[in-house]
Image (cartoon, grey):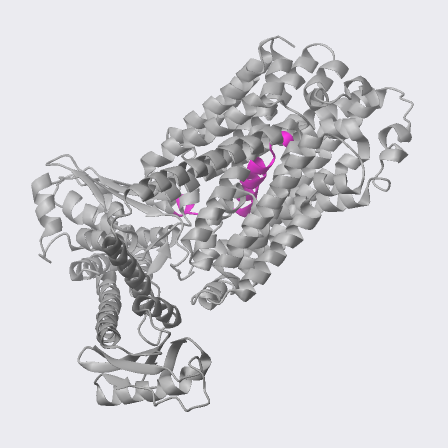
Amino acid sequence: MTSALPLVAVGMLLLATGLIGFYGLRISRTTSDFFVASRTVQPVWNASAISGEYLSAGTFLGLSGLVLLSGAEAFWFPVGYAAGYLLVLLFVAGPLRRSGAYTIPDFVQARLDSLAARRVTSVLVLVIGWLYVVPQLHGAALVITTVAPVPPWVGSVGVAAVVSAVVAAGGMRSVTFVQAFQFWVKLTALAIPVVFLLVVLGGQDLALDPAQVFPPEAGPRSYDTYTTASLLLALLLGTIGLPHVLVRFYTSPDGVSARWTTVVVIGMISVFYMVSSTMGLVARVVAPDLAAPGVADTVALVLPARLVPGLGGELLSALVIAGAFAAFLGTSSGLVVSLAGVVSQDLFGGTVRSFRWSAVACTLVPLAFALVTIPQGLVTSVGTVFVFAASALSPTILLGVWWRRLTARGAIAGMVVGSALCAGALLVTSALGPGDGLARSLLAQPAAWTIPLATATTVVVSLRDRRGPQPRTDRFLRRLHVPERAPER
Amino acid sequence: MSGPAFTGAVVGLVVGVFLTGALVLAWRLARGTRELGSDSERATFRTLHLASRAATHLRDGLEGDDVGRAARHLRALLGCDALAVVTADGVVALDGPATLRAEAERVGARTVGTGRRQVYGSREPSSGTSVQDAPLEAVGAPVLAGGAVAGAVVAFATRVRPPLVRATGEVAQWCAAQLELGELEASRTALAQAELRALRAQISPHFIYNSLGAIASFISTDPERARDLVLDFADFTRYSFRGRGDFTTLADELHSIHSYVELERARFGDRLTVTLQIAPESLSTVIPFLSVQPLVENAVRHGLEPREAGGTIVISARDEGTQTEITVEDDGVGMSPERLRALLASGSRATNVGLRNVDTRVRQLYGDQHALEIETNEGAGTLVRMRVPKSQPQHETEVSRP
């Protein structure tokens, strides 16, 4: 695995990304091209961009690793990730697009007319974003050690450097097409090897034991009901609170197209999860020796070379590595752009210069976290971010869209309670280490009680708030919920 | 479930937040004890603080929702037992026991009616009642704003002494000043809106005349083209004269610019080339209605028209984090920076109206840091740059996409 092929693949990926980023503008030389150049982004492209940003290292490498480790119970993660977009589609995609807000803090400020609520939201968005970038950098460290004999920090630092340089240098001139391209890279980088593996395995006569793939004791039915329900709740609601999702919807011309975009996103990420899970299942049959924590996440990188000998295997590995880098770069740069936007707007009045400095700062913080912590299961660390986002931000966003009486004080109380409880529970869990029992389950998967508590706090404080909802609430809500005029002509 | 990754991250964050908080607190304390000041200085600080707190709640007028909170601060300011704000319609805010409402209304109505200060002493408490149950004495002072009595401030105390009477009068006067300030603010906003509306659509008569002339010249030679031009003219005027909406999206504005450019090209022929470089994510940005088209028109009229050979206009839009940057560049004659400064500063309505108009509007809407940036010099062409924030939840657009 020390050949130059992976380097070439990553180099080609970076080159293609750069080319699309810098020449992805639609340019018209004659006036007859005017309409082409000024046509808004089609839902399919925007959906590819959203999926490209959403499918992080956590799912690209981590999902197959988790399936390899724990079998069918790992399927709850892709189910939750994909279904999260169903809630986005049903409850927030259209209204948030119509709100005209660009980031979640923008939305909260416009909805509640409160600078304090905006500040609290900004802090939470920053925390969520940073926590989300950390697993990306861990993934990069993991890949680099698999590919070359270098220390793991090289990968994290490398990806962080590329991301902050690209974002700070004025960024991609056309982020949508870059992210869309990276989605297709990720999908093909997993789909082609999986097809090859299935073809190779199809020729052999394998004695397949279903119990090996779906061990009864680890099946969904025997999986602790509370833990599963709580995790699913977090994954479902967490997507709404992710900082880089709303930003992409801004590209859609109106609420209707934002909804269509979401529908396409659900289809695209479902296909991806199917491919990724298949990889894990194949590994469970042919490479059970990799099923150890910390190693399992490399299965997508190692498996092709194992099963397809010679140049073919190396090419496939190189493809997967390029896909993995697309995952790190896509998700991290999307997150860093959103976070830098929040920081520059809240602290420096949103100038272009401050945006660049913020971008660098927003990469350094998670890089520091990533360097002092040890990579564990990628899927679970991404899952933890979802738990936190679902407890801290999702109640406020959902109530902000759907409940008239929400007040700034209620929102602030809910966000503080939700994030504090969730962070506390997770900290206690990691301090105590692994263990069993109902109390431990409650602490390890806090979403099922933190989300209701945060929501209840928001509602109670809002109702008891003597100031009542801000005066322009009705007007703003009408704008969120009344569809745009039907297209003419 | 959660790995050490998360632990490390959260521990680091919590420790950081605590440290920052502790530092800020310590600093505040250190500064606070040093600069607390003498008793009279502190009394001044307290008074000013209460007054500024109350002021923000009075800006919406005595009919506003916040008057209740203003009353609370005013009571603290006067140090009286209860305080009511009364208008001709009755009590609008009462800070104190609800049993005083009738009394407050009576005193207030009398004060508003006479327009003069009223003091009501209590009758001697009848023999059976204790001191606490004794009726409070009241003083009412009129709020005279804009030459008319807007309402009255009524203060209650167990014993109304002359200082309280005088202070109540002062507070009422101060309230009047705040109300007048609020009205000033409101009329300033109204003026700005009126100005925006007046600035909005200014199709130049020259353009209409020239376009119709160009169309006329094609009617016999190239009827097909003449027909297209008439449609472009119709599209352009419909967009420019549309009734509602002060905002539009960049995509809509570009459609209108297309019609405009077609009409200009009918006159210029091949001498005018227009190139677009548009990042697709910038198309949904909300921009002030007719804010890019005047820039293009300016480039045509003042950059390219004076030149024999014509030239090229490049319209580009790109993503800049939380903003969208729109530039219009031409390789025409340009102008000296001094002349440009004079044009933008002067109130002359003869030339470059469009440029100044757009500059005024974006300044009013987004603040001075979003003013147009213009790079130009004699013979070096002109580049006009406009930065618009992407997030504009308060600005609604008319959706009119085909």
Q: Is residue A239 visible?
A: no
Magenta segment, which residues?
A: A35-59
**Viewer-side residue, B80 vs B316:** B80
Image quarter in which the C terminus of chain B is found: bottom left
The residue lying furthest to the front in this view is B127
**Which quadrant would the N terminus of chain B be assigned to in this image?**
top right
Q: Is residue B339 something one can see in this rendering?
A: yes
Dominant secondary-structure state across the stretch colored magenta: helix
Taking the magenta stretch, the answer to whether it contains residue A47 is: yes
The one of B393 and B59 positioned closer to us in this rendering: B59
User: Within the image, what quadrant is residue B320 found in?
Assistant: top left
**Residue at image location 46% in from the left, 34% down from the top:** B19
Q: Residue at x 13, y 39 (%)?
A: B333
Q: Nearer the viewer, residue B145 or A329?
A: B145
Direction from residue A423 to residue B96 in the image, left or right: left
Q: Residue B193 vs residue A286: left or right?
A: left
- Residue A27 pos. (x, y %): 37, 38
Q: Is residue B137 above or below residue A263?
A: below
Q: In the image, is residue A10 part of the stretch drawn in magenta? A: no
| Residue B171 image point, x, y percent | 25, 71
Task: Give the left or right position of residue A444, taking residue B346 as reference.
Answer: right
Relative side of A135 to A18, left or right: right
Percent from the top left, x then y, of residue B120? 29, 86
- Front residue of B229/A258: it is A258
Q: Residue at x 12, y 35 (%)?
A: B379
